[in-house]
Image (cartoon, coloured by chain):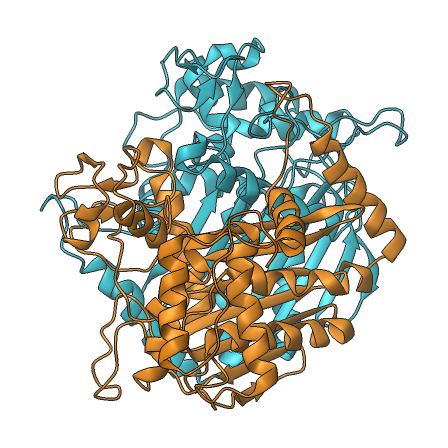
Chain colours: A cyan, B orange
Amino acid sequence: MLRARGLPGGRAATAAQALCHGDLTGFTTHGLTNLARLYLPLLDSGRCDPRAEPETVTDTGAAVLLDAHRALGLWAAAEAMDLAVERARTHGLGMVSVRGGTHFGCAGFHALRAVGHGMIGLATANCGHQRLVPPPGGAAPMLGTNPLALASPAGDHPPFTLDMSTTVVPTGRIRAAARAGETIPPGWLTDADGAPVTDPAAYDRGEAQLRWLGGDPEHGAHKGFGLGLLVEVLSALVSGSGVGPQPAAGKTPTARPDDDVGYFLLAVAPSALRSPADVATAATGLFGALLDCPPHRPDEPVRYPGWHEQRRTRERTAHGVSLAPALHAELRAVADAAGLAFPDAVPSGGAV
Amino acid sequence: MLRARGLPGGRAATAAQALCHGDLTGFTTHGLTNLARLYLPLLDSGRCDPRAEPETVTDTGAAVLLDAHRALGLWAAAEAMDLAVERARTHGLGMVSVRGGTHFGCAGFHALRAVGHGMIGLATANCGHQRLVPPPGGAAPMLGTNPLALASPAGDHPPFTLDMSTTVVPTGRIRAAARAGETIPPGWLTDADGAPVTDPAAYDRGEAQLRWLGGDPEHGAHKGFGLGLLVEVLSALVSGSGVGPQPAAGKTPTARPDDDVGYFLLAVAPSALRSPADVATAATGLFGALLDCPPHRPDEPVRYPGWHEQRRTRERTAHGVSLAPALHAELRAVADAAGLAFPDAVPSGGAV
């Protein structure tokens, strides 16, 4: 479907991998559900240019600034991380700062690209000019959910991959609960007076606001807000992309709040600084000791972020991904509209 | 007092600045209270070498690996950030990775050193082999409170400075509450069954454990744990310092769990990538818009991390820092023991 919209084959394939990463790892709010809801509309409205070619604005060797020129973030951020990895091979670390981007999907997908080269990857994105979350004590939303991911080799163990929004949950979790007609735990949303809201549909009715990681001031809301600002600074102040607290006015007349997203992609190569064998031994020791930590409940062994995601990816790659009937129907509809063949549903657990 | 222990004058002055940063900004748990409790005992026991000279292990230009050889972290991390800034001037970013360090005080002090050069500073430290916090679902502590700081220029406004532990609060907050005989909010500590503990003294009795930022799984405890691991990976896996989950066995016979701390210091120079005037305008716009956010309560305007810290620093630099009588007496006692003059207490609010 991405190729039918004009994306070159290799880039369409990378974007499809980035999208499927959500369904394979379990971050389903950032998976195929976003194809018909987010990415195809971005392409069809012209806000995302399927044939965009990122332009190098500045290149210092270890650091590169790119203008993505409205490229699809799913592949543009991946290629930017690959460039950061290339530079880290020479310099010990490499940074690629990107402006003019669009929604890049799972931050963890991009961070993980460094791990295949024995490096640590850090990926952040702001949300362009979108205003979704108020600062602590503020009555108006000012920043996005500003995702951050770090992925690291773990020696003999599955890579460590932290992939998080800096809010308690991303907006996709709220909307998925609303679609499913579920209530949400107190602490995700609050009303104008700060009281908990457990009806997720209140968010899109404008009656509730998302909270920062940490929830309330006593439990670290200023840290969640500060981490959201850390992402804004790294993604937007370095690159010159749009920022949440400032309107998109003065840009192109068709600009939407979520245009002009900024990314920050950093690759760090420990093996450029010390023996690769020592790095691998230390990583195996660190993550192995965590897996060996005595658990609270004998049937729930201790894991670290990324462990379950790798297990799910292996299982789902081998046995297929279960899609909700509504999502399958939605994908079939967009395939039909594009005149493309689409596989019939098979019972859950069947081969695909 | 640091010079009397053998530190060279310039380094003693930097260390004293780092220590006073805590009292000036309001991070009093990391201020002068730690001189007699932490730093002098480190020096007196020989675990910290007052005359240590950090050694360059590897230097790729943009990235440097140092062995601090048990130098006092208060100055060694500051000098490492200064080196990262120097490298960022040429390469657009600079990273200094440090092993063999000791407790570096306020992470924000080190991150802020980049801001004076128009750069963004990121500073993290692990806690050596110390085990203070269990992973979610784990029954044994495995990692430290792993601080992280990011500081950024904010144009015409006070620098943005996020300075945080990756736990709900640092251990110093728990111990300060215990010394003051106060109770703490539920959610900072839990007992072995996960129930909230509000008696801070239970922590040092071994009856309660510190929680990660996010508190419980539904509100993002895996994010707090993941951020703690992010700090561990950047600080220790890159440098080869001690790590929490592995014992110090096999190192020197006198090794203590909080020896061999690792730091990660990163300086990013946006002005190496785009016009310094554009960076300043964007920073003024971003942080100015946050300060202009309509507040919930008219008498509590919206602020961002670092704003109050700069205000306090200016006020206290001009009018003096109030010390609790017990801390003043403690400092006098260590000064007397070193044969050094020490000022008498003056009433709070008086000139010093």
Decide if residue B198 is on the left or right side of residue B125. left
The answer to whether residue B74 is above or below residue A163 is below
Work out whether residue A213 can be spotted.
yes
Residue at the (53%, 42%) spot, across then down? A106
Q: Is residue B187 left or right of residue A16?
A: left
State the image coordinates of residue B242 (x, y, percent, origin top left): 34, 75
Q: How many marks?
A: 0
- Residue, x 45% and y 26% (percent of image)? A173
Name the spot of residue A43 as percent of width and height, x first. Answer: 73, 30
Q: Quadrant of residue A300?
A: top left
Q: Position of residue B83 (x, y in %)?
A: 65, 77
Decide if residue A79 is in sight here: no
Q: Is residue B291 above or below residue A309?
A: above
A337 left or right of A283 in image: right
B249 and B159: which is toward the camera: B159
Image point (61%, 52%), residue name: B316
Comparing A183 with A194, the one in front is: A194
In this rendering, position of residue B180 left or right of residue B224: left
Q: Name the residue nearer the viewer: A147 or A247.
A: A247
Q: Is residue B129 above or below residue B33?
A: below
Residue at 30% across, 48% down = B174
Quadrant location of the N terminus of chain A in the rendered image: top right
> Where's the C terminus of chain A, which quadrant?
top left
- Where's residue B32, x and y in %? 45, 63
